[in-house]
Amino acid sequence: MSITLLPDLLRTTRARTLALAAPLTDEDAQLQSMPDASPAKWHLAHTTWFFETLVLAPHLSGYRSFDDRWPRLFNSYYESLGPRHARPQRGLLSRPSLAEVKAYRAHVDAALADLLAHASPGVSALIELGCHHEQQHQELLLTDILHAFSCNPLLPVYDAAAPLKAEAPEQAWLPHPGGIVDIGHASDGFAFDNEGPRHAALLAPFQISNRLVTCGEYADFIASGGYREPLLWLSDGWAAVQAQGSQRPLYWLEDGSIFGLHGVQPLDPQAPVMQLSFYEACAFAEWAGARLPTEFEWEAARGLPGFAQAADQAWQWTRSSYAPYPGFKAAPGAVGEYNGKFMVGQQVLRGGSLATPAGHARPSYRNFFPPAARWQFSGVRLAR
Amino acid sequence: MSITLLPDLLRTTRARTLALAAPLTDEDAQLQSMPDASPAKWHLAHTTWFFETLVLAPHLSGYRSFDDRWPRLFNSYYESLGPRHARPQRGLLSRPSLAEVKAYRAHVDAALADLLAHASPGVSALIELGCHHEQQHQELLLTDILHAFSCNPLLPVYDAAAPLKAEAPEQAWLPHPGGIVDIGHASDGFAFDNEGPRHAALLAPFQISNRLVTCGEYADFIASGGYREPLLWLSDGWAAVQAQGSQRPLYWLEDGSIFGLHGVQPLDPQAPVMQLSFYEACAFAEWAGARLPTEFEWEAARGLPGFAQAADQAWQWTRSSYAPYPGFKAAPGAVGEYNGKFMVGQQVLRGGSLATPAGHARPSYRNFFPPAARWQFSGVRLAR
Amino acid sequence: MSITLLPDLLRTTRARTLALAAPLTDEDAQLQSMPDASPAKWHLAHTTWFFETLVLAPHLSGYRSFDDRWPRLFNSYYESLGPRHARPQRGLLSRPSLAEVKAYRAHVDAALADLLAHASPGVSALIELGCHHEQQHQELLLTDILHAFSCNPLLPVYDAAAPLKAEAPEQAWLPHPGGIVDIGHASDGFAFDNEGPRHAALLAPFQISNRLVTCGEYADFIASGGYREPLLWLSDGWAAVQAQGSQRPLYWLEDGSIFGLHGVQPLDPQAPVMQLSFYEACAFAEWAGARLPTEFEWEAARGLPGFAQAADQAWQWTRSSYAPYPGFKAAPGAVGEYNGKFMVGQQVLRGGSLATPAGHARPSYRNFFPPAARWQFSGVRLAR
Amino acid sequence: MSITLLPDLLRTTRARTLALAAPLTDEDAQLQSMPDASPAKWHLAHTTWFFETLVLAPHLSGYRSFDDRWPRLFNSYYESLGPRHARPQRGLLSRPSLAEVKAYRAHVDAALADLLAHASPGVSALIELGCHHEQQHQELLLTDILHAFSCNPLLPVYDAAAPLKAEAPEQAWLPHPGGIVDIGHASDGFAFDNEGPRHAALLAPFQISNRLVTCGEYADFIASGGYREPLLWLSDGWAAVQAQGSQRPLYWLEDGSIFGLHGVQPLDPQAPVMQLSFYEACAFAEWAGARLPTEFEWEAARGLPGFAQAADQAWQWTRSSYAPYPGFKAAPGAVGEYNGKFMVGQQVLRGGSLATPAGHARPSYRNFFPPAARWQFSGVRLAR
């Protein structure tokens, strides 16, 4: 990233995280509704810890850590960076307070400003990584608070503004001729390590939908008995449906309305369906006589004329499991733990969502979650 | 209770709950560290719900409930009073806020003041019950916040004042001749239903210790291998020790200090050992060549000269399981769910603790917890 | 026991265990349907291990153990006798075979015959204990195989003979005047350590039913909504009902018939209801406007004229938890682990059942199981 | 398959299953040591049920089912074929007996012989599928009995003959030029549906090891601290190692010997390491500075000169998750449940093992197991 843009990226990223947390009370910011989710306060602190530990401590001479007892609280999963507070217990950290975490942020921000003034390219790259890392947590902050609010019978509203009305284009199949395509990050700009190395892949001809599956279409799937017909489901998916007694997506209420960041809203038949698991996505596709695209198909089709709702509505489950690209090698040390060690048991999602920060996603971007994950802004684009 | 004392009891009880919560931040007040514990905020609200639901709604004409959606949040376990928010999820109620809960308290306090002015004896009795109920939750508020704080690696301090230095009297065995004794509540004053009916019981002669087991004595038990010798333990207790890898009481730290409401303190050999499970209490007694008293022995010996630390240090596990007294019959309706339905699988504790509100406990008082419970102010008085 | 009777007791006891296992195939004898139950083959071997380890090894000079690797397989819960094969994995011991276990029995029987010829009183007492221990396992063998068979959709029949028709006497309340009664084992004959010391207890006047609750009466309880009314249940019991979705006793089938040792039989309204948990017993008593007797009441009433079905139909849950009698002290060493270490978390059952060996039970006999146990021959005698 | 070969395949396959079960006692044949494993008796019956249900019932007119109550016992996972006995409870089916199951096999064999005499091509194809299905269960019978025996402290021996001595060729890297390769089943012979459609894939140049990783090499990995270094492991793998306290492969004993079908044997440094999880395979590869091949690389390299131990020692974990090939479409009905519904959460293994029936595997064969599975004959072939 050019030396003139990085300060701006850092400043806006850091400010946006605070802005996202602004509607939350101190109590809201501490909620952890399941082991896979984290409190908003923890997101605020962890993203700061990332800068402190990976950037400031090794690269800003004379840097004084804010509190020596905190790194173990806010280290997420970096084995090479020492012991960690157990993930399912993040919601038990009433101390430090939200105010103290904000002071931590300010302390680190000030030090980063110092460092930026004369940062080497290597250090700049780390700071840029920290910004993209924080952007990921911005989306997680929203998915996690939404899940937490969904556990409160009062169904608190994160954003009282009315949701934007979605306009679904007429469904159409976009043909792709297949052949050898280049996959992975190409430009000079930032990318995560898992987006490379860029490499060639061979595709058979395929068709992909111009838009995401809508809530109306998904409601038809339900109405036709989709959650009661085992033959539509992957075996693990059917087991999950049975175990959970699922009859609809996680945030669809019994009365036909849907809970979201704007509170309870009537089902909008034109809006993309979201918060689906991979299992639900596959079952819907089977019912619809179609399938999910592979992540390579998705990336190849991304630039086709008419390819709508690419990255602004919901992440799109792909039929690809999360695996290393040919020649991928994790970096040594803590930075290498960022992506590589999760490359099993997860499915790739492509695109981006209405909760993804502007400028964060790329056509080569690889999001990933376990197939059972239902609390992300995750939807379906069909292929055939 | 005399009509002149009840307003005072109500006022001081309600005020003391708020005072106990005063050192807590909004975030602290929301902590729920295990399904058996509840957030402080929930205790504040539940005790208020009790008055609203059992006293105001049926007995104050024209009473307007504070919020119709809240009863399901703050009903603890009353099946006859409708559906309830799942107990393990009490910590997920960031809304209502602590401030709103305090407003709820004020609303109910005002209505109670109205009602008190012309309350029938039956209603007065219900209000008195509500006060004693709230006093129970005052102790739970302290036990629960201490457990929650113990889960935070920062080990927050509830009360920064130095703990009182305990003075253990010289240990002595107090003899009791046995014979027929009267057990259960006798006077006109308040008592819970489980303290009656008063009835005769026959005791063999026994001896009981004049004081509680000290931390110094318990440290000797540990040092002599008490947590490694299965023959000292009840079978369920040994299984718990093995499953948890226990080597010492819950709040004893590896370095020999002890965590408590006043933070981490050096082990005081004279102080009564606390936060023991029934299993630990029995294993210690076995090691010491003694036993736990039955609840009847405890009650009979309570008035013996020299019987120290009766109710001001730690509840005392007894060898009696929690069962109905002869002729006990639960009241019909919700009030009847208060005690009777828990009369299996629990052991009786007698006495009172440093966390018990003044005036709350009585010689006939029956506290009860499952034998594995380790987070209460529960200690040991030996018998033989 | 007189020196002339012990050989006979030993012979008949050992023979009866084999006879009970005779209807079982090798495969049946290996079934373990839950951690709390054991395979029939394991019962055959464990009772033999008991004699080998506690009698032969220390007391028959020159005794050669059958197989040095087996004690760890067949030690049940004796911590003082070395490591044990995990209880839930007893069903995984296809080796030794049933035939090898029978050879083990013969080997031990032969050695016991040798020893008996010149056994000291102390050794004779241990052999007598081994016989009573084996009788306990005879009943467990039946309860456990019945549970195992109930898990097979084919519902195998243990005994193809038709069940005896039960004749319930007309229900009547037998009055007892209360007062001081002697409790515990009195005579010179055998008793387990937990039946003593004999001691006095004080009872209030009470009434006890002359017979057990019948299947017909229990069917009325079900029909009137007993499994749907939480106020009838102890809190733990209601939680169990909810978690298991219980609507009837464990072996009652949906079509109104009942599975038992004689296979599926139509409900006999006169037959005592069995295989109830303590929770079910209490809920029924509550519904019937009565209660369970304490174990002292039961023992005191045992000799009343008209007290029918004392020990020949079903064990009778009492309202007493399993606790040491005044002055009880477990013996040192392995024998001391027999009873004492289980004295928490269990309820006492009195009487005996149709599966109890003749001569095994006594009026002072204390059977015990956790309150949730549903697979024993356990029924209800009401008191009030 | 040619009409003349099918009867022979059927006969030899059916006979070999019985031969594999011959060393087992009735009790051995009933062992189920975990939900993922099945009793040998169940394998014998299930493979027979497959023929009865999918071949005989629909295609042999007048066929009389052996026992109408059995299909629910022996249906494995076919939702379209009715309710099933719960998988974790297969070990509780002492009835039908092993002898009855063998009679079932004979009954079905006789009917199949009738049908074969005039089977249509479609029916012949189903019979052939049934044979390959049964061959799969032959390997599972061995993996499952080995696991069951490993749970018995006596460590029973399945085959008392001495194991063959393995000869590991000198390790060498075989280069492959990459390029477009054809993947999937090609010939006219039998293949499972998941091996097609045949399609082209593009590979980068790579190298693959000429042989499997040996026990000696794996012992070096352990000795160098491989099970204690989290950075070598995938995140899920490290979590499994921590949760299980793993320090070596499942059947490696503490004393350095290894348990297998031939009993406990000294570690043979030249023998291929087996019974690894995908996690262990990846950690070893990381430690060795290499990686696992993809399934496409494996298939492309399969024919390279020097490619040893392809299918006769251990299945080889690949870096490919189990997913549908382009254009894959499951067949309608029960046959379609065979493979497709498992295409998530599993990794592909290629090759074959010493437990795989001769003639069963093919270069295009796709075996699959969850990454945590450790009880298969699964090893590692490295790539780079």
Image (spheres, coloured by chain):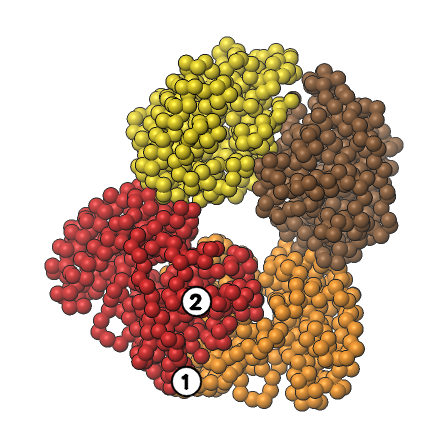
Chain colours: A red, B yellow, C brown, D orange
Q: Quadrant of residue B214?
A: top left
Q: Position of residue A117 (x, y in %)?
A: 11, 59
Q: Quadrant of the C terminus of chain C?
A: top right
Q: Position of residue A169 (x, y in %)?
A: 35, 73
Name above or below for residue B156 compared with residue B177.
below
Determine which of the numbered discs, if any, sits on residue A205 in the image.
1
Name above or below for residue C281 compared with residue B109.
below
Q: Quadrant of residue B135?
A: top left
Name above or below for residue D26 compared with residue B26.
below
At mark 2, the secondary structure is helix
- Left or right: B60 in relation to A1: right
Q: Quadrant of the N terminus of chain C?
A: top right
Residue at image mark 2: A216
Please indicate, yes or no, whether residue B317 appears anywhere in the rendered image: no
Say few, some or many: other residues with alpha carbon within 10 Å of mark 1 (under 14 / 14 to 19 / 20 or more): few
The kind of residue tagged 1 is Pro
Q: Nearer the viewer, residue B304 or B289?
A: B304
Q: Residue reaching furthest front?
A: B62
